[in-house]
Amino acid sequence: MEKQFFDVAIIGGGPAGLNAALVLGRARKKVAVIDEGRPRNAVTQETHGFLTRDGVRPSEFRRIAREEIGAYPSVSFLADTVMSISGADGHFQVATAQGNILTSRKLLFAVGMKDRPLDIPGLTAVYGRSAFVCPYCDGWELRDQPLVIINKGAELMHFAPLISGWTDRFVICTNGPDELTDDQRDELRRHRVPKFESPIRHIDSEEGIVRQVVLEDGTTVPCRGIFFKPELVMGSDLPRTLGCTMTEMGTIEVDLLGKTSVPGIYSAGDAVSRMHQAVAAAAMGATTAAAVNNELNAEAWHNESATTPD
Ligand SMILES: Cc1cc2nc3c(=O)[nH]c(=O)nc-3n(C[C@H](O)[C@H](O)[C@H](O)COP(=O)(O)OP(=O)(O)OC[C@H]3O[C@@H](n4cnc5c(N)ncnc54)[C@H](O)[C@@H]3O)c2cc1C
């Protein structure tokens, strides 16, 4: 395959990578967006909370974005998986699963996060239909409904008050012994939040809509929706293997402009943030793209003046 040269290779074509591509395309940079098309929100029917796009299908969001970016001819799309990257700032070599080799001055990782397999029987069948992870994304659709929160740790002390803004009909299933302090248990009791510690046997549902959570001790908890805490891993291991410093939470460490600890490598979106929202990812993509563009322009400017005679 013929080698291709780019100013920026964007790895990942979700909201973060696409908004970065839009900004860089408008800044006349030669950009490759390489995306294998496996976003975490593929399980959902609708994306909420993105102004002008509230309720849009994730696939439709991407289609519209790519159509808009199509106005900027210096941006190319590649449906492929980046497998390995070598080189350094100014000259990275990107190799893909389908045998493409790209060379780029800068890298922008917008690889998102991935769910580890869900270990509760029946949860996969309802994930994205009536079981969700974020009430800002899906709480409105479940307002005033009976809900189950599946979580056992101290985060419950944040999550229970948060959910109470959407419904006061919720119970907690800890799926095994809770990991709370006595004070935390008291607080839940004072707020009359029922808590079941028996392990979950399975989740009963019909066409993706949960009917009840069935516990090992025989208890059945009828409900219309579930919020649970997923276990997440980075969408790609490449940033870590390239030496990018990672945070304790497993995200890529970046400064306010999306710069990682490795020169020439930037990152944006869920991969760098705990705020997993499409609009936040897109905003980070835009900010980071501006930072990449500034660096490219500054480098070109200084190279030019270095060669100009007095
Ligand atoms: C169930 C669920 C519901 C949600 N609902 C909402 C909602 O209603 N509103 C909202 O704002 N947010 C919602 N979110 C969160 C939202 O989906 C994310 O915040 C957003 O998609 C993050 O964008 P991103 O660009 O960082 O990553 P992603 O959208 O995950 O995109 C990352 C892309 O990178 C690709 N990739 C990874 N590694 C490679 C590689 N090596 N080579 C090529 N490509 C690669 C992946 O395949 C993927 O396509 C939801 C999330 C989930 C899980």
Image: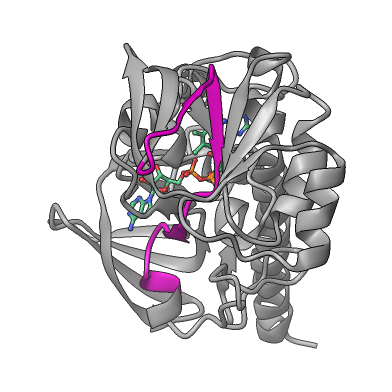
In front: 126, or 88? 126
Image coords of residue 303 (percent x, y): 65, 79
Which quarter of the image is occupied by the C terminus?
A: bottom right
Quadrant of the drawing holding the N terminus: bottom left
Residue located 72% across and 31% down the image: 136
Which residue is nearer to you in this view: 169 or 237? Answer: 169
In this rendering, the answer to whether 39 lies above or below 299 is: above
- Give the color scheme: rainbow, by chain, secondary structure or one colour: one colour
**Taking the image as drawn, is residue 225 in sight?**
yes
Reply yes or no: does residue 235 show up in magenta: yes
Quadrant hosting residue 40: top left
Indicate whether 284 appears above or below 305: above
Residue extent of the magenta highlight? 216-239
Image point 65% across, 83% down: which residue? 307
For the point 48% across and 24% down, which residue is it?
Answer: 58
192 relative to 279 in the view: left or right: right
Q: Residue at x 73, y 14 (%)?
A: 144
Q: Is residue 130 above or below residue 173?
A: above
* Residue 101 in magenta stretch: no
Residue 286 at what x, y percent from top left?
69, 45
Pinpoint residue 71: horizontal percent, then vertical percent: 53, 24
Q: Indicate whether 206 appears above or below 47.
A: above
- Given residues 35 and 252, the one toward you in this image is 252
Left/right placement of residue 250 relative to residue 203 reads right
Q: Residue 56 placed where, x, y %?
A: 56, 14
Tell me how many marks there are: 0
Q: Is residue 25 visible?
A: no
Left or right of 93? Residue 281 is right
